[in-house]
Structures are given as C-alpha cells and as structure tokens.
Amino acid sequence: MTGAGVSTVQVRLPVPLCTLLGLAERTQVLDVDGPVTQRSVLDALEARHPALVGTIRDRGGERRRRAFIRFFACEEDLSHTDPDDPLPDAVAEGREPYLVVGAMAGG
Amino acid sequence: MAGTRVLVGTRKGAFVLTSDERREEWQVDGPHFAGWEIYHLNGSPLDPDRLYASQSSGWFGQVVHRSDDGGRTWETVDNDFTYASQPGQHQWYDGTLRDWAFTRVWHLMPSRHDLDTVYAGIEDAALFRSTDGGRSWTELSALRDHRTAELWQPGAGGMCLHTIVEHPTDPDSMVVAISAAGAFRTSDGGASWTPINVGLRSGEIPDEDREVGHCVHKIARSSSDADVLYMQKHWDVMRSKDGGDTWHEISGDLPTDFGFCIDVHPHEPETVYVVPITSDSLHYPPDGRLRVYRSRTGGDTWEPLTEGLPQEHCYVDVLRDAMAVDTHESAGVYVGTTGGDVYASNDSGDTWAPIVRGLPAVCSVEVQTLP
C-alpha cells in the first residue's frame, strides 16, 4: 500500500462527466500526493478538473458522496466505506482503476 | 440582413438554431452538453454572443456554462448556490414543514443593464445574482427571508423561482414569480420584496385570494409599456396595468385558461400569446389540436392560430419557458413542445412552420434578434 510520495492512479469517469469536461477518454491518470484514499483521489481529480466540484461530492465541509454516485474498485463497492481509508494496492499502484459510477436507474 | 438565433434547452441537451431575418431556412447546431437536462439557455440583451446554460442532473447535480461566442464554445462557471442565510422551512405537499434545500437552477436571466450581471432562479425558491458573468453567485436573501415564506409550497414541479422580469429602465426594479407562492416585486435591487398578488384567486388554497400561495406559471412584460404585465397562472390568464399592484382576469373566450407559457408582442403592448392546455391533470392541448391563442386587445378576446400547427393527434405540452418572441419588424413567435418540435411564426403568429422536429422534450426556448 502506498503511503507517502506521489502515486499515479487511474480514475474512470461516467460518460456524462466526460461530456461535461469535453474529454474523449473516460480514464484519467492522476498524480496523488501522499496516502491514496478516496478523498485524496477525488481531491486530485477536482483539482485537475474544477468543473467537477459539486458533481460527484457535495460542497459541504465533509464532501459527502452525492446520493446517486457510487465508487467501485477491484470488484468491490467502496461507496459506504470511510473516504480516508487506504484504497487497495492495485489502485494505489495504478494497476486497477478507481471507478466513479452513476447509479443505475430507469427502466 | 439581421439574423435570428433560437436557443433551445431540452431534456437531453441544448440546441442553437440560426436563420436570417426571413426566418425560413434554419441551421441546427447541437446537441451541446448531450445527455444533460438543460432547464434554461439564455442570451444577454447587451451582447448576443454572451450565453448561459443551466444543466441539471439527478446524479451529478447543477452545472452552469457560459459562452462568449454565441454558443460555439463553452466554459463552466460557478455552480455554488449556497443559501446566504440559514435556510428555514416551507410547506410540503402534505401540509408539513420541510427544510429549504437547493435542487437546481430553473431560470437564468442575463441583465439588460449590465453585461456581467446575471440572475438565477432556483429550486427551492431563491434568487441569486452574479456580477462577474457567472463566476460567483450571491443570494439576494431578503426574498427567501420574506415573512410569508413559511406559507410557500411546491407546485408539481417543485418549489421553483422560474420567472425573473427586469424593469426596462430601472436596474433596481424587478418582478419574480415562484410556484406556488406568487409574484414578488423589488424596487431596491433585492433588499426588500413586496408580494404583488392582489386580484389573484386560486381554488387550490383554502383562502382563494390570500396574499401568497398562488401557482403563478409565467409573467411577461410589455416591451413598450413597462407597467403592463401579463400572467399565465395555474388556472387563469391575468393582466396588470400598474406594474403588478393589481391584477384582473383576461381569460375571456379562451377554450381553457390553464397553461404554462405567455408572451407579449414586441411592438404591440395589447397583443399577447398563450397556449391553452386542457387542465391541470391533462397536460396537452384541448382536442389534441396545438393552437396558440392571440389577443390583440390586451386579453378577453382571443383568436386561435392554427395554420402550420398540428391540428390532430397532438398531445404535447408547451412548458413555461418554451415560448419566445423576437424583435424583428415582422415579429417572430416561437414555441417548443414536449414532443421535441419547435414551431416558428415570422408574421406575428398568422402562420407557423416547424423549424426543427424530433428533439428531446423541449424545456425552454429563447430567441435573439441579431444585428
């Protein structure tokens, strides 16, 4: 598990957010400074793309996950885990993506 | 030759339609922001290349975009609509009280007095202003803090501030409307607000002529007489001759006075347009015939405009922001439907033609008369 220094991680975004940002590629490669957690990855993502502020997490001090957003990695649902817990090594080492997912809805 | 640009917000993206002054041949550009619900797309009266778009998503929340080149390119601007003071409570559908909470921006109104000033009407009802072209927003909180706010309640679409009507010459004077609270007016730049609902009667509230609680759907101001306002209420079409101090009903011989949109001819203050909708439970035109109604007498006496509009099997709605008028010498009138068609008339409503068909459901239509 990477705990210090800079880690290079992959984050996969849902299509509507790629449309918002004008991105052709859904997977973004980010440098994360320090421990690789959901919070640090999303902070780095929002720093790279300020237009995402408020679209994945709310704007309050705790930056809580929006209700219809889910976070997956390594075939696990991390949506309800502590955002400051370390992410799996495979994510921290850039071998597996961290997935931001719009919850399934509709018919 | 002057040009015409129609800005269309739909359930799944924005479209920009352009033509010349004849308004016979149209170019369709879009979708912009494909997949995003565009509640409103609007342009500055001072610089037609300055546009704003409100995207809203149940998943991803609120986004606001701005264009400085007439919609060719866009940049995201601020989407922080945090209430300026501690939100209180308002009525909920079941009569209980519910905390105020931001849901989305319904309406964007670039100021006619200052290029970088733009207003946003939001759900739950509040009015925000930006003076830096959308890069930051500040609530004009005296409206939400009004002594009557605890009596406001949501309409079927939510408790939204959907109408912002500036005064043509006084930048401190403005009328807004909220469903279901009613109309309010400020004359001091939003520091204080007065309910302007005298004359409204609503059977949906216990006291029919109460000060607030009315489901005003849309207000339009005459461009040639600032004191003349027209209103489409949940039921009833209304007119004020005194800037909103008092209202009187002008439904007259309309087939139904339920509807959402209303607008005024750009050169004739007595000429007004509505689209009658069957009822509050049947949101489509009577008899499946899409008819725009025009009064040339300030209301009461209305004529159906049908030439070029579908006159059978048409069960669409025209939402509150989906009617617009341009300012060409021969005035243009535009309506967009929940069936995804946008119809235009280049002769004040005498004849109509679809200028685009099969778009996603249309939420809003605005038009710019280009130099």
Image: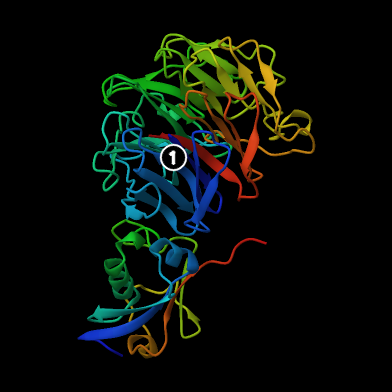
Its colouring scheme is rainbow
Q: Position of residue B319 (x, y in %)?
A: 58, 36
In the picture as drawn, the residue positioned furthest to the left comes out as A5
Q: Is residue B241 above or below residue B143?
A: above
> Regarding mark 1 in the picture, which secondary structure is present there?
loop
Q: Chain of mark 1?
A: B
| Classed neighbour count for the residue bearing mark 1: other residues with Cα under 10 Å, few (<14), some (14–19), many (≥20) | many
The residue that disc 1 covers is: B124
> In this orientation, does residue B94 appear?
no
User: Residue shown at 27%/89% (left/top)?
Assistant: A2
At label 1, which amino acid type do we have?
Asp
In the picture shown, does residue B313 fall above or below B296?
A: below
Residue B35: image location, x then y, percent:
53, 58
| Above-or-below relation of B343 to B228 | below
| One can see residue B185 in this view | yes
Q: Position of residue B101 (x, y in %)?
A: 42, 44
Q: Where is the C terminus of chain B found, in terms of image quarters?
A: top left
Where residue B182 sits in the image (x, y, percent)?
A: 48, 24
Q: Quadrant of residue B12?
A: bottom right
Residue beneath the point at 32% across and 56% down = A59
Say which of B215 and B320 sits in front: B320
B134 lies left or right of B254: left
B279 or A87, which is in the foreground?
A: B279
The N terminus of chain B lies in which quarter of the figure? top left
Q: Is residue A66 left or right of residue A46?
A: right
Q: How many numbered callouts?
A: 1
Query: Most extreme residue toward the front, as rendered?
Result: B1
Viewer-side residue, B354 vs B238: B354
Give the image quarter of residue A66.
bottom left
Rendered view: A7 above or below B218: below
Q: Is residue B362 left or right of residue A71?
A: right
